[in-house]
Structure formats: structure tokens, C-alpha cells
Amino acid sequence: MYQHVMQTTQLSLGWDFFIPLIGMLVMILLAFRIWVVIGLGSLAMLLTTGVLPPTLLGEALFDGVDSFALIAVPLFILTGDVLVRTGLSNKLLDVAEATMGWQRAGTGTSTVLGCGFFACISGSDAADAAAISRITIGRLVEKGYPKGYACALVAAGACTGVLIPPSIAYIIIGLVLGISASTLFLAAAIPGVLILVSVMITNTIVNHFKHYEDSAVGFDFKHWVRTVWDGRFALSIPFIILGGIYSGIFTPTESAAIAVMSTIVIGFWQGTLKLADFPEMLETSAKVNGVIIPIIAMSLPLAQTLASLQVPQFFVYTMTALTTNKVLIILIMLFILMVAGCVMETTPNIVILSPLLLPLATEIGMHEVHFCIFMITALGIGFITPPLGLNLFVVAGVTGTSVMEISRYVISFVAMMLVFVLLIAFIPQLSLWLL
């Protein structure tokens, strides 16, 4: 399996590569914006190595964002914002509570299920965390949960924002690696739900020992039917998005556009949305999009430079020289992804690491779609791991709880999610069965 890699002993990289790389690491530590780091690092590598003309940078900036698939990113973000402003997100949480509220840890489990519902629409973990925390933290505290734990629960549940389709992260990694976003959405369905279940299981176990709540209320079928009927318009949005994509009627971009129009029409029809709301909604979507798109634009010249320098091949050779054991290599990749997720957001990790790790994954026989699911799921843990832990900061900002207080409670969620990530890594059919 590794014969052709092990024969590539002539691969080597010099200081003309490592000096720009060290400079990029220093800029990251100095808190430079990541798109600046990638852009300056790409330019420095082009100048020091001479492997490609520096004019490539200017051309690639436009080529990197000239993609129809990327239009889905701001549209999904806007859909999530409209969902919150129209109150449809509250309807989703009501359905979740009517479905799961009868359990002993029902309020906490319902909150996690609500995160999953919202993830089926927004495609963004930060939007998920911000929307759900505003609505549910008070409910959880009233039920007896410590505020820090309630925040940790929402932050962990919101990780599914990038794990359950439609996910912005899968659109980006599909664009970087040249894989259909629709294929990735289909493959991510089971793993995304499994991570959601892992958070529910953790909450149930913790609640069993800590006795935070005891929702000793039986399941009321009539109440559930009334709640589902009342939330029918909110529930229709994920069905429109996922049903259209999985049936092949819509592309992910088309489904995002239809989702935006559907939520807007529902908002106007119910009287919960006004024309005056649009400037602020569009501004919010533009700000989030303005963080993601420059990173993608800058990533293309960096990827082309690394490919020309044979860095992916060098990385594969180095790793397989250490070990040819498939289990160990997967564990090493998991360690790299978890450490990267602790210090950088998902988008830069995708554009930097996926071209490096994919050749290694395929070298050990991992399917490229399986690799994408494994990578995004592993990076998803980074949303609740300090020091970055984006979801921790989002929930802390909404609730006024300190990040350190929330971090005390996330350990159990990280541990259970890690167990499920290992299952996804070593059982390829969890990702490939629906394909």
C-alpha cells in the first residue's frame, strides 16, 4: 500500500519554505486576522521558493471565490437570521420540547434536539449557539441546571450547526477538495445525528448523577400533535432544504435561495417580519460572510503553492515513515485536527489542512468522502474546546457567563463526542452507507 510513497525518499523542503511557515505561525500567535496570515504567507512562499510567479496571487484571489456553490453560504446564514426574527426558531424548540420533554432530563434533551432542528436550516454553529442560548438558558436554569452547565449544554448542542446538513463547512471542504456538496450532505446525515445523540446521552448521564431536573411528566400525544401543527411552517423549512437536496430537485445553492424566500414569505404572512428588518439582517449576513470569503480567496494560491512544492507528498512520506499502521495514522490525524480546532476556526483549518491530510487518508485506504466527514466532525469538537472554543464565547457573550465557568462543564461533552468521532473514523459505513 505504501510502496510508492516509501520510494519517494528524495522529497525534501528547505528554509525557503519553513521561514514563511514560521512567519505564519508567529502572526497567528500575534492574533493577526487569518486571511491576512494566509495571504502574506502565500506571497512569502511564492517569493522565497520561486516555484510559481507572484502574479498568481492576484489571479487566484478571484478564482478562489468564483464559485456558484459559495452563494449558498450567505443564503444559509440569512435563512437562520430570518428564522430567529420571525419567531420560527421558537416553534422549533416547542416541537423539540413536546417530543423529548417527557424524559427525566427532558428540558436539556429538548434543548439539544432544538439545536439539531436549527442546524438543519442555518448551517452555522455560531448562529445556532446565539439563537438557542437566547431562548433556552433561562428555561434550563429554572429547571435546576447551573447556568454554566446550561451554557455548556447549548454550546455542545450547537456544534451540530456544522455537522448536520446543510452545513457551510461541507460546502467549503467540497469546494477545496472538488467534491460535490450534495454528496457530502448525504454522507453527513448519520454522523451528524450521532453527534447530536452523543450530547443527549451525556446530558442524561450527568443529570442522572447530579439530579439537575426530574421532568416526571408523561408523553402527551395530543399536545405533541398540536405543537407540531402549530410549528408546521418552521418544520417545513428543513424539509424543503434537505428534501430538495437529497431528491436531486435542488442544488445546495438553489435550496438555500428557496429556504430564504420561504422563511421571508412565512414571516410576512404571519406578520412577524417587516421591510424595516431587512437592512439589519443583510448587514449581519454580510459580516459573517465577510469573515469566511476572504479566507477561501486567500487559500487557493496557498494550496497551489503547497502542491507545487510537493508538500502533501512530503507530509505523506514523513507520516508513513513513522508508522504504516492505519489505526495509528487515523489517531495522529485526529490529534492534529483536535489541536488545530483548539486554536483556529473551522474555515482556515479546512483550507489549510484538508489538502495535506487527504493524500495521507487515501494512502491508508480511506474514502475521500469518509475523510471529509471525519475531518469536519473532529474539527467540530473544537467549537467547545478552549482557548478558541467559538461556541463558548458566543454563549458567554449572550448570557454574560464567563468562558472559564462554562469550560468547567464541557469536559464530559468533549469526551463523549470524541468517542463518537472515533466510531465515525473506524466505521466507514456510518458515512458511506447512504451513498
Image (cartoon, grey):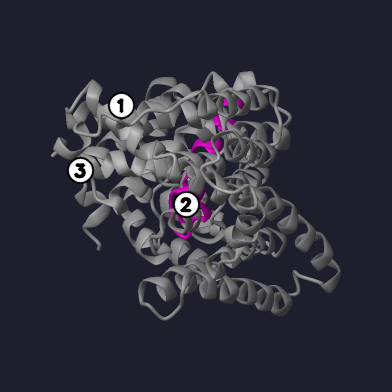
Q: Residue at x 33, y 31 (%)?
A: 11
Mark yes or no: residue 414 visible: yes
> Which amino acid type is shown beneath numbered disc 1?
Thr
Residue 425 image offset from top left, x and y in percent: 27, 39
| Residue ID for mark 1 | 318
**Viewer-nearest residue: 266 or 330:** 330
Q: Which residues are magenta?
A: 148-170
Q: For the residues marked 2 and 1, what is the alpha-carbon distance in whole angstroms?
A: 39 Å
Q: Is residue 166 magenta?
A: yes
Q: Which mark is residue 72?
A: none
Query: Element under label 2?
Result: helix
- First along the sequence among labels 2 and 3: 2
The image quarter containing residue 239 is bottom left
> What's the residue at 56%, 22% (across, down)?
407
Q: Which mark is residue 116?
A: 2
Tag 3 residue: 427
Q: Are the residues flagged by discs 2 and 1 in contact, CB closer than 8 Å?
A: no
For the residues bearing labels 1 and 3, Cβ distance under 8 angstroms: no
Out of 156 and 343, give the one closest to the viewer. 343
User: Which residue appears farthest toward the right when viewing the image?
Assistant: 276
Q: Quadrant of residue 354?
A: top left
Q: Amino acid at mark 2?
A: Gly
Tell me the residue at 41%/44% (across/down): 355
